[in-house]
Every structure is written in C-alpha cells, then in structure tokens.
Image (cartoon, rainbow, N blue to C red):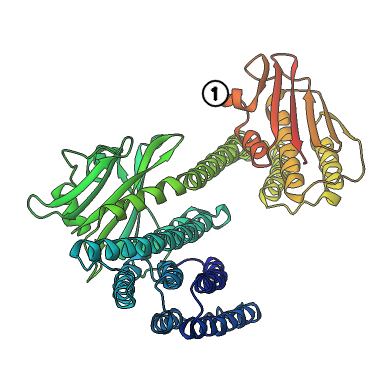
C-alpha cells in the first residue's frame, strides 16, 4: 500500500523545506570553523546546493499536479561531495540526518536502515581521516559508529512512521467509501472484500454475519479478481463452530493447518495470547480449500456478530505475521460502525418490505378476495334460478356486474397507489387535496384537510414520505377504524413539518400516548408508518382511546 497522492505531495513538500533548513544549518556549522580554503569551498558548494533547492521548491509549486521532486540520489551525491570538501565532520551530520529522514518517508524503514548504516560508516571513516577521533581504540570506533547509526535510524523511523500513518489513513478512507448505503449491501461488501484481498495479497476474502433474528449465518465470499455481484450463502446456526470458531473474541492466524499446524492468536479484549488456538473443522477446511487463514471479529451494538476471513496467501506471499493480524484487527474495528449501519438499513428495508407485503395481502384478502367469494356464491344461486325465474336472474346478474365494476375500480386504485411517487414540495398540497377529494367520493367518512400554507418548502424526500404516510393513514382508518369523521392538519414553521391525523373511530388496541420507539418495544402500531417516519428523521406519536378514536402526530425537523 502507498499513501494517498495528496499525502505523498505533502511529504514531498516537507522534504523540500527540510532540505533548505538543513543546508543553512550546515553552512552555519562551517562558519564556526577557522577560515580556510577548504571552508570556503564547502560554503560555496552548499550555497550552490541551496540555490538548487530553492529552484526545486519553485518547480514543485509550478508542477504540483505532476508530483515532480528532486531524487534522493542527488542528496546522497551532495553529501559525498561535502564529505570530500569539508574540513570537519560536524557539518556532515545535518545532511546525513536529513537523508535518513527522507529515505524513511520515500522508501520505508526497510530501505532506509541499510542506507543509514552505510552512510554512518562513511561519516565515521571521514571523522577518523580528518582526525576528530584521537584515540584509535575499538570501543571508540564502536561508540561513534553506533551513535551515528542510531541517530540516522531514529530519523528514518520517524519518516517511516509518518509514511505508514498516511498510508493507513488512505486505506481507511478507501474502505470507508465502500460502505455506501445508496449502492446497497451486496455491492458495498464486494468492494470491501476486494480491498482486503488486494491489501493482504490473498486468494479469497470472506465475511460471515450471524443474524440472531433469522437464526441464520450469512456468508459472503469473494475470490481475488472476481467482479460479479455477491450473493450470500445461508447456513444454519448449527455451523457456528465451523465458521465462527465458537469464540468470537479470538483473533487468530493459521499459516498451516496440516497436522499440528502453525499459528498464533490472542484474545481481542485484553491482547493475551491464546493457549489453545481454535481450529476450522476438517470437513470445512476441505470444502473451502483452506491452506492458511487470518480471521478477526467485527461488532454491532458493542458485541461481536461476525468475522472477516482472509484465506490462502497468493503464490510467493510470505507467511502471515503478527503485524498483519494486528492490522486486520484495526481495520475491523474501524469498519464496524459502517458495517452496522449497512446491516441495520438492510434490516429496516426487509421489515418495511415485509410490512408492505402484509398490508397488500390484508387488503386483497379483506377486499377483492372476499368480493370474489361472494360473487361465486351468488353466481351459483343465479345459475339455479335461470330455468325457473329468468327475470330475477337477469336482475341479479346486473347487480353482480356493478359489483365487479366497483371492485375493478378499487383494484385500479390499489395498483396506482403502489406505483412509486415523484412528490415535490410544490406538488404536495395539490396531491393531498386530490387524494382527499377521491377519499370523500369513495367512502362515507367526512374528511377535513387543513393546510396552513399553499406552498410548503421542504425537501422532496420528506414530502414524498409525508404523502405516503397521509395516504396510508387514511386508508387504514377507512378499513379498520369504523370512524365517521377524520381531521388532517399539515403545518410548517422554520424548524419542523408536522402532520396530525385525528379520527373518532374505535382507536387502537392500546390506550394512552406512545412514541414510535415505545410502540416498537411493545410490538404495536403501524409498522410501515413507523419506518417511513424514521427514514426522514421524524418523531411519531400515537394517542389512542379505544372506542373513542386515535390521533397520529408526526414531527419532522427541517434543520
């Protein structure tokens, strides 16, 4: 992994400014020496290099979109020249430490440490040649060499730390962007698993989620290089020990599963090493073709609910290290809140779909299916009457024809109501008034629609949900409340939009005033209306007085 281009440009600017400061410090160190030809040559060289560095700064500003920078080889060459020209080792320390720091940023600690060792040895040899070390003892050599190397290694470590921090932030930003509710659960998980498979160079990445409500395990699998839409496998909870290892607190790695195998792991709660490492059962190993694996748990509501699995390092990939497992654990910790939101949205959508299907099923059962049953019975009666009383049969058929016509109109209205609406704030009032007029014509209920403004200024998505809630509330009252009068009020001020639906029917099965959350805990109230209210951040309150009606109030903040 590499840092984000913007972070890389930031580090390059750091190097450019640090180079200028280091050259100035080296020049000041030379001014502390007694004047000589060697000092003059060294100062002249450093001034020329300072001028070049300023030019590099200007070029970087002009070519910032191309990422141009002075190669580190030029700084090493400049140190070599100064090593030859300088009459003292003191000015050499500044460019040496700068090179170690820049190498740590550009190459990482693995590339910077050998360079620091070679340069420190060169500096010590130069110091001995110049004569700054007067005691040619082994201990002095070791102390000077070790101290020089330690200084360079420390600066290289700081540079590498900055580089790794930026790299991790860039990766976190990428995987967070994969958790997009608009693209859905399947695509979000595919992109997430794809990032993990690439980052750790594995053949396959998996995510397992234990759904307690459905009593199932969902398994998403992505093989490296695949781009098809992910469809989860569903497994019974009895396979928990096979895939969730019977211990969701274990952070685990197996580099080999043959025989006794080789692996390591720890308890994610306190970091203590696991004495007995959980194992994937043999049949599961064979089924999934597992040779090596890393796995960590992820949380929802503060408790572990699933696992990430990374399987089988690609050809030539070195065995997984503890640092790899710790990095995967940090990724899981970072992504858990986003995953929780995605799964919660999936759960809410599933409940909304289930509620809508139940409502449609109930409407069909209570409406057209009952009518069809009645029509069938009446047709049988008329069939028997045709030979004896044809006039009564003709009259009965006319009545049946009107019944079928009325049910057809009702069915058309139902189909129309199921179509998605494109409601805008400018259309909301007209749509509500139009539906109210139709509602009065099709039922015996008296409906008063009170709107405090002809023009409502609210986001379109809020207007769409408000209209759906309004329509569903009135249909529920018509079918179930046995009311004679309904009053609907829609008001808006600077901070909120309020919808109130008040009827004089039988009310709900409960008495009192409850919020949507309280109704959820009691498993009461209209599910679809509760979910629609939540999607726009609103607050639902229902006040019910059995036998005397109910009042439904929805308040949606606009800020």
Q: Residues within 10 Å of mark 1 (few under 14, many from 20)?
A: few
Q: Residue at x 49, y 75 (%)?
A: 34
- Residue 252 point in image, percent of width and height: 25, 47
Left or right: 392, with 223 as reference point: right
Q: Which residue is mark 1?
A: 521
Height in image: 477 above or below 108?
A: above
Image quadrant in which you'd find residue 20? bottom right
Relative to 204, does residue 44 appear above or below in the rendering?
Answer: below
Query: Looking at the image, can residue 427 be seen?
Result: yes
Position of 23 with respect to 257 (left or right) is: right
Q: Is residue 34 left or right of residue 136?
A: right
Look at 33% across and 50% down and name the residue there.
326
- The one nearer the camera, 91 or 346, is 91
Quadrant of the image containing the C terminus? top right
- Residue 388 seen from this side: no
Determine the residue located farthest toward the left in the rendered image: 259
- Horizontal and vertical percent position of residue 222: 35, 61
């Amino acid at each position: 992994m590499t840092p984000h281009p913007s972070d890389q440009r930031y580090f390059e600017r750091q190097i450019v400014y640090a180079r200028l400061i280091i050259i100035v410090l080296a020049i000041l160190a030379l001014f502390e020496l007694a004047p000589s030809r060697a000092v003059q040559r060294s100062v002249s060289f450093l001034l020329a290099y300072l001028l070049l560095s300023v030019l590099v700064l200007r070029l970087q500003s002009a070519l910032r979109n191309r990422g141009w920078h002075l190669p580190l080889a030029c700084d090493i060459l400049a140190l070599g020249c100064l090593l030859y020209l300088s009459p003292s080792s003191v000015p050499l320390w500044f460019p040496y430490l700068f090179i170690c720091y820049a190498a740590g940023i550009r190459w990482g600690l693995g590339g910077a440490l050998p360079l620091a060792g070679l340069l420190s040895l060169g500096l010590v040899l130069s110091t001995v040649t110049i004569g700054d070390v007067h005691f040619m003892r082994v201990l002095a050599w070791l102390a000077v060499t070790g101290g020089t190397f330690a200084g360079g290694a420390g600066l290289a470590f700081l540079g590498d730390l900055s580089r790794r921090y930026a790299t991790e932030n860039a990766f976190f930003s990428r995987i967070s962007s994969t958790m997009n509710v608009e693209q859905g659960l399947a695509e979000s998980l595919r992109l997430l698993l794809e990032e993990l498979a690439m980052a750790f160079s594995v053949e396959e990445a998996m995510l397992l989620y234990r759904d307690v409500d459905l009593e199932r395990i969902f398994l998403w699998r992505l093989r490296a290089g695949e781009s098809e839409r992910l469809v989860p496998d569903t497994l019974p909870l009895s396979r928990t020990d096979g895939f969730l290892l019977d211990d969701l607190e274990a952070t685990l790695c197996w580099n080999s599963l043959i025989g006794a195998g080789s692996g390591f792991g720890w308890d994610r709660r306190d970091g203590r090493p696991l004495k007995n490492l959980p194992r994937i059962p043999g049949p599961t190993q064979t089924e999934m073709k597992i040779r090596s694996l890393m796995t960590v748990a992820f949380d929802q509501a503060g408790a572990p609910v699933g696992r990430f699995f990374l399987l089988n390092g690609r050809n030539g990939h070195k065995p997984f290290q503890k640092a790899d497992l710790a990095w995967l654990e940090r990724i899981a910790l970072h992504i858990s809140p986003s995953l929780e939101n995605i799964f919660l949205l999936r759960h809410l959508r599933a409940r909304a779909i289930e509620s809508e299907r139940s409502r449609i099923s109930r409407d069909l059962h209570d409406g057209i299916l009952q009518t069809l049953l009645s029509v069938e019975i009446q047709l049988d009666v008329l069939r028997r009457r045709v030979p004896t009383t044809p006039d009564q049969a003709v009259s009965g058929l006319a009545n049946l024809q009107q019944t079928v016509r009325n049910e057809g109109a009702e069915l058309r209205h139902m189909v129309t109501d199921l179509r998605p609406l494109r409601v805008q704030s400018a259309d909301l009032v007209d749509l509500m008034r139009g539906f109210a007029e139709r509602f009065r014509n099709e039922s015996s209920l008296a409906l008063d629609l009170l709107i405090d403004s002809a023009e409502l200024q609210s986001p379109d998505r809020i207007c769409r949900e408000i209209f759906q809630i309004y329509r569903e509330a009135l249909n529920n009252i018509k079918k179930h409340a046995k009311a004679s009068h309904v009053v609907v009020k829609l008001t808006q001020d600077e901070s909120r939009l309020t919808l109130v639906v008040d009827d004089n029917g039988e009310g709900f099965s409960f008495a009192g005033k409850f919020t949507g959350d309280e109704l959820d805990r009691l498993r009461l109230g209209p599910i679809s209306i509760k979910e629609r209210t939540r999607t726009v951040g609103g607050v639902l309150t229902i006040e019910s007085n059995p036998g005397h009606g109910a009042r439904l109030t929805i308040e949606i903040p606009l800020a």
